[in-house]
Image: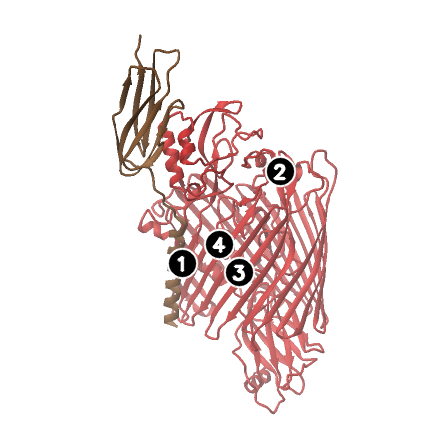
């Protein structure tokens, strides 16, 4: 080791550049090229990587093209990287960190022993502010710096530019929240209708999060919204852990809130550098705006380095919430099979207590051959009554250090097991080709263009398979393309811009209780992001995105008939007309500034300020046809509104003239209605006002054993701080929830009559009441917490 | 760097304010203040009759009138003379119509009687 350090002092350099998109969804990687002083590839150079906290050792050798690839690294670090070859001066780099789902790219030049080296750039960890295909990678530091209230995963994910939240849940690219995929350590979290609205993992257990919307890796499937991959913490060589509690109650909030969280984590080595355990538990519960809720997580993970070539991970989790209980497990074996091949075997399962069980088995084989890195894999899953068989192949071709091209194809064959009359008995197979590229535009590889295109296949929620299909059913499918540019400046600033466009190939459409499909719909997104880490402790993240989505059916109900009867339309024979999606919230501004002093004594202060700005939620203007079925589709309560001109309005029959004036004012004061008089409204044409929220987090650490990082932390999270200054700030709105009819629609007019003959209209009480403020989200809320880290 | 940081904050604030202001639409409501004169008409004849009344307002208004009447104009803005054509009443000796001039939270009825009660 001493020799290597001496070599480092006299050796030659390396170039570190930005991360490359890697087909790693549960880990990180390191790859690159090794050259001699003439920049000729050096074959046989050893690349040795050691993970500091666990002592885990990874090693490989460059091939004839001087290329090396190391997969299966734990996200984060720090790592120590050594590159050496007989007759050359070696290179050693300390404090390297790698990012989840990305491969740190190294370009190493080994000089002859007698020549002094040249360092092209500092050996900083690769930084990846945006995952390929639009998204964000968040490390533990960011998770801890975000102000949170109930410690939900959604509180963190809102910082992804392509994310919007609303009445239906968390949406990516303004797509259906039911079509997202959330995987923890590579294992799916089950059917979206199970545990809906419940955070699938405690924030305290998260090591890193990666969100993508258009990944080019063929291994990633099962979504047409966003893919969220979470990696949990593991044990290390140090015995450590935390115990914490957070409390929010009366006097700490302007809303009716009483909520507490208690939890702990502990990690330890069983065999140093070999075997580690990590466990945690958390209970959170209370009353939020009159609604009782609780969530309990228990989690245990074992990491075992089986010699130099194999790493085994096993994790089991129990989740108890007000909507259900589930036990899940996942086990992964990463194997390095010589210098050119590696394998990843992953088995997972989720048992919803009293419900269905999901099982999955995945195997990926990687082969490095010259400029090519091949991936062959299979992913088989039994999801309720559906056995999904998948196979895929992919090639990542790196003809030069500045260019990477990946192309692959994936085939999915879902089989409905068993026979049951009156339900879906066949789901169409699908083939999903993918193509991605990354082109570095400068020698130091600090700037690059990235993009690609592909087909993505989601999963039909299990509940919908209970209904008969109109022919064979189809999984949700979209075609998406992405183009992005990312620049890492020398002074630490990073900017990225991403554009994503998608076309619906197949989406669910219910005709009464029959599962049918439609290909209408498209979405696009444009996002810009700026990140900066200041050495004096400040981190900035600013993003702005426009996310638009248009659809003909927004299924968000487990019951087909309810989805159909609540689907608004004018023509009862064709309710597939395209309109803005219910999940469309066009503008999303996100800002996070967090400060933590890099130099500190026994006290350390951390401060974060977060701003979220989001366009309002869409709703439809409807006729209150609870008395009569205005559009004649057999379902009252789902007729869209016609916007009369002034001349038409005064010519209508009214039960009360004041109703006419109120309706006229309603039209005049509404942007959409006032500019679309004389036509029928479209679905989701209305929108609640823009919402802005400012959150603050203040934490004070008191170290009682600074060397080991042991400290007590007092933390205060103030959510919607603007509302504390003025009741007019930070207002959020609810969508109308009607007793009869579609949610997310406001009854504007009530026609009285019989058999389709309207005798008189009256302005509806729903519209009179105006927008409904969300009593919880519109109020400032504060949570106080204590955490002991040992 | 400080200069860049300042610019960044200004841009962020400007985007936020612009976005908020751009999306929050405010339209023009009907007037909340209007007067009508005269507010009653009585015609002894049941034959086709034409009359008018004056609206004094500072903003927009609408009129909700029975289908039988022809009213011109039915909506407008500011001070306006409104003409009303009352059709000939058939098979009755007397008939009464009420039309309403409406603004925001203000509704002024205008009563028109035709013929005489027997």
Q: Which residue is mark 1?
A: B15
Quick check: A725 left or right of A277? Answer: left
Name the front one of labels 1 and 4. Answer: 1
Q: Same subunit under labels 2 and 4?
A: yes
- The mark lying in front, picked from 1 and 3, is 1
Location of residue A773 by image quarter: top left
Chain assignment, label 4: A
Identify the residue position indicated by label 3 in the image.
A136
Query: Mark 2 against mark 3, which lies toward the viewer?
Result: 2
Helix, strand or loop at mark 1: helix
**Residue A165 place in picture, x, y as percent:** 49, 49
- Disc sitting over residue A510 in the figure: 2
Specify which label sits upstream in the sequence, 3 or 4: 3
Tag 3 subunit: A
The single residue placed furthest to the top in the displayed view is B118
Q: Which residue position holds label 4?
A: A158
Single out the residue that lies furthest toward the bottom. A114
Position of the N terminus of chain A by quadrant: bottom right
């Amino acid at each position: 080791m001493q020799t290597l350090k001496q070599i480092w002092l006299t050796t030659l350099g390396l170039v570190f550049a930005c991360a490359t998109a890697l087909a790693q969804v549960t880990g990180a990687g390191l790859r690159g090229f090794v050259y001699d002083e003439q920049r000729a590839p050096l074959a046989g150079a050893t690349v040795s990587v050691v993970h500091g906290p666990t002592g885990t050792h990874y090693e490989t050798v460059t091939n004839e093209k001087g290329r090396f690839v190391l997969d299966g690294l734990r996200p984060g670090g720090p790592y120590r990287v050594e590159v050496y070859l007989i007759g050359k001066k070696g290179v050693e780099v300390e404090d390297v960190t790698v990012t989840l789902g990305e491969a740190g790219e190294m370009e190493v030049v080994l000089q002859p022993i007698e020549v002094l080296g040249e360092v092209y750039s500092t050996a900083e960890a690769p930084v990846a502010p945006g995952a390929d295909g639009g998204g964000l990678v968040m490390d533990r530091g960011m998770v801890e710096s975000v102000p949170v209230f109930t410690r939900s995963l959604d509180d963190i994910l809102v910082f992804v530019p392509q994310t919007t939240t609303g009445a239906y849940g968390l949406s990516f690219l303004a797509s259906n929240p039911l079509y997202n995929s959330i995987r923890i350590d590579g294992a799916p979290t089950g059917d979206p209708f199970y545990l809906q609205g419940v955070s699938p993992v405690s924030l305290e257990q998260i090591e890193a999060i990666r969100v993508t919307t258009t990944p080019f890796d063929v291994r990633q499937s099962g979504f047409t919204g966003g893919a969220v991959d979470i990696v949990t913490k593991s044990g290390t060589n140090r015995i450590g852990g935390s115990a914490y509690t957070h409390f929010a109650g009366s006097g700490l909030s302007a809303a009716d809130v009483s909520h507490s969280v208690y939890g702990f984590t502990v990690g330890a080595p069983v065999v140093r550098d070999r075997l580690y355990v990590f466990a945690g538990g958390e209970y959170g519960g209370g009353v939020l705006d009159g609604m009782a809720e609780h969530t309990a997580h228990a989690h245990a993970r074992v990491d075992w380095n089986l010699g130099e070539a194999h790493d085994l991970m096993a994790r089991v989790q129990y989740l108890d919430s007000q909507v259900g209980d589930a036990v899940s497990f996942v086990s992964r074996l990463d194997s390095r099979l010589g210098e050119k091949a590696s394998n990843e075997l992953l088995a997972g399962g989720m048992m919803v207590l009293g419900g269905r069980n999901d099982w999955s088995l995945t195997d990926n084989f990687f082969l490095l051959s010259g400029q090519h890195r091949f991936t062959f894999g299979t992913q088989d899953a039994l999801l309720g009554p559906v056995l999904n068989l998948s196979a895929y192949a992919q090639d990542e071709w790196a003809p030069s250090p500045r260019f990477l091209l990946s192309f692959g194809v994936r085939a999915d064959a879902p089989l409905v097991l068993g026979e049951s009359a009156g339900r879906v008995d066949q789901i169409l197979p699908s083939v999903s080709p993918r193509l991605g590229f990354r082109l570095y535009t400068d020698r130091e590889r600090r700037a690059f263009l990235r993009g690609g295109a592909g087909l993505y296949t989601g999963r039909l929620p299990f509940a919908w398979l209970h209904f008969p299909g109109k022919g064979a059913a189809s999984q949700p499918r979209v075609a998406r393309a992405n183009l992005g540019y990312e620049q890492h400046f020398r002074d630490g600033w990073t900017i990225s811009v991403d554009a994503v466009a998608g076309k619906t190939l197949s989406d669910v459409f219910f005709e009464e209780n029959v599962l049918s499909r439609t290909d209408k719909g498209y979405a696009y997104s444009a996002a810009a992001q700026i990140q900066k880490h200041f050495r004096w402790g400040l981190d900035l993240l600013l993003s702005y995105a426009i996310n638009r989505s248009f659809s003909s059916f927004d299924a968000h109900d487990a019951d087909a008939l309810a989805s159909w009867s609540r689907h608004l339309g004018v023509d009862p024979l064709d309710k597939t007309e395209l309109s803005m999606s219910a999940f469309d919230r066009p503008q999303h501004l996100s800002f996070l500034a967090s400060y933590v002093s890099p130099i500190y004594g026994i006290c350390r202060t951390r401060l974060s300020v977060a701003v979220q700005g989001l366009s309002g939620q869409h709703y439809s203007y409807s006729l209150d046809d609870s008395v009569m079925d205005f559009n004649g589709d057999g379902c009252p309560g789902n007729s869209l509104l016609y916007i009369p001109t002034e001349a038409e309005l005064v010519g209508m029959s009214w039960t009360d003239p004041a109703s006419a004036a109120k309706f006229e004012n309603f039209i005049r004061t509404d942007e959409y209605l006032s500019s679309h008089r004389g036509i029928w409204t479209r679905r989701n044409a209305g929108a609640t006002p823009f919402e802005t929220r400012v959150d603050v987090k203040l934490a004070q650490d008191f170290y009682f054993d600074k060397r080991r990082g042991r400290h007590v932390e007092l933390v205060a999270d103030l959510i919607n701080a603007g509302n504390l200054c003025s009741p007019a700030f930070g207002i959020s709105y609810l969508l109308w929830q009607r007793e009869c009819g579609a949610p997310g629609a406001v009854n504007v007019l009530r026609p009285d009559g019989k058999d389709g003959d309207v005798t008189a209209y009256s302005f509806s009480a729903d519209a009179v009441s105006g927008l409904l403020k969300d009593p919880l989200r519109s109020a400032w809320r504060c949570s106080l917490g204590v955490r002991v880290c040992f | 760097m400080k200069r860049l940081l300042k610019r960044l904050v200004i841009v962020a604030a400007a985007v936020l304010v612009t976005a908020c202001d751009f999306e929050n639409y405010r339209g023009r409501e009907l007037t909340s203040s209007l007067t009508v004169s005269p507010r009653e008409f009585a015609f002894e004849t049941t034959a086709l009759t034409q009359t008018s009344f004056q609206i004094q307002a500072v903003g927009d208004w609408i009129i909700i009138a029975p289908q039988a009447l022809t009213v011109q104009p039915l909506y407008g803005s500011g001070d306006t003379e409104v003409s009303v054509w009352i059709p000939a009443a058939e098979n009755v000796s007397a008939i009464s119509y009420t039309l309403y001039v409406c603004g925001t939270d203000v509704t002024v009825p205008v009563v028109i009687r035709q013929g005489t009660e027997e």
